[in-house]
Image: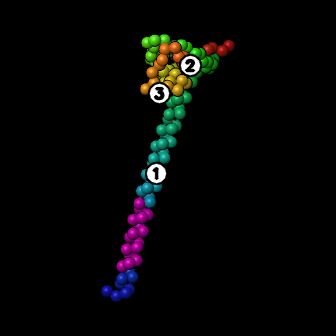
Amino acid sequence: MGAMDLRKRYTQILIQKRKREVLKQKIILSLLFILTVISLSFIINVRSTFAKATQAPDNNIKCYKSITIYCGDTRTSISKEYYTGEWDSVTSFTNEIKKINHISNDDYLIAGNYLTIPYYKEIH
């Protein structure tokens, strides 16, 4: 092999290496694009679902009241007691109570403490 053959072979190797790098970059960019689209779709879906869950009838205004927690009260029992039809379900109402009061699934209700409860009041 002469110097010219070595130079051609070296150039071919560099071209192949560059093609592999470009292919890797295209795959990475494609994956990033797909992940971005999925993330945005998820965020939009969550926002629209939350907006639907908290949307009040036209002639109602959202208000809040404080209630005392009694021994034996649970998030579910309180939600069932104060639930009204403005929420999609008792579960969505319970989730709103948890959000308003900064309660996680692991938190226990303590008798004597207070909870803020949302409700809708008709405006005239």
Find numbered disc 1 in the image and state the secondary structure of the residue it sits on: helix
Name the disc covering residue 116, or none.
Answer: 2
Asked if residue 123 lies left or right of residue 69, the reply is right
Name the residue rendered at 40%, 73% in the picture: 14
Quadrant including the N terminus: bottom left
First of labels 1, 3 by sequence position:
1
From mark 1 to mark 2, how far is it between C-alphas?
A: 42 Å
Q: Residues within 10 Å of mark 2 (few under 14, many from 20)?
A: some
Q: Which mark is residue 82?
A: none
Can you see residue 88?
Answer: no
Residue wearing tag 1: 32
Q: Position of residue 26 (x, y in %)?
A: 44, 58
Q: Earlier in the sequence, mark 1 or mark 2?
A: 1
Looking at the picture, which amino acid does disc 2 mark? Thr
The kind of secondary structure element at disc 3 is: loop
Mark 3 sits on what residue? 104
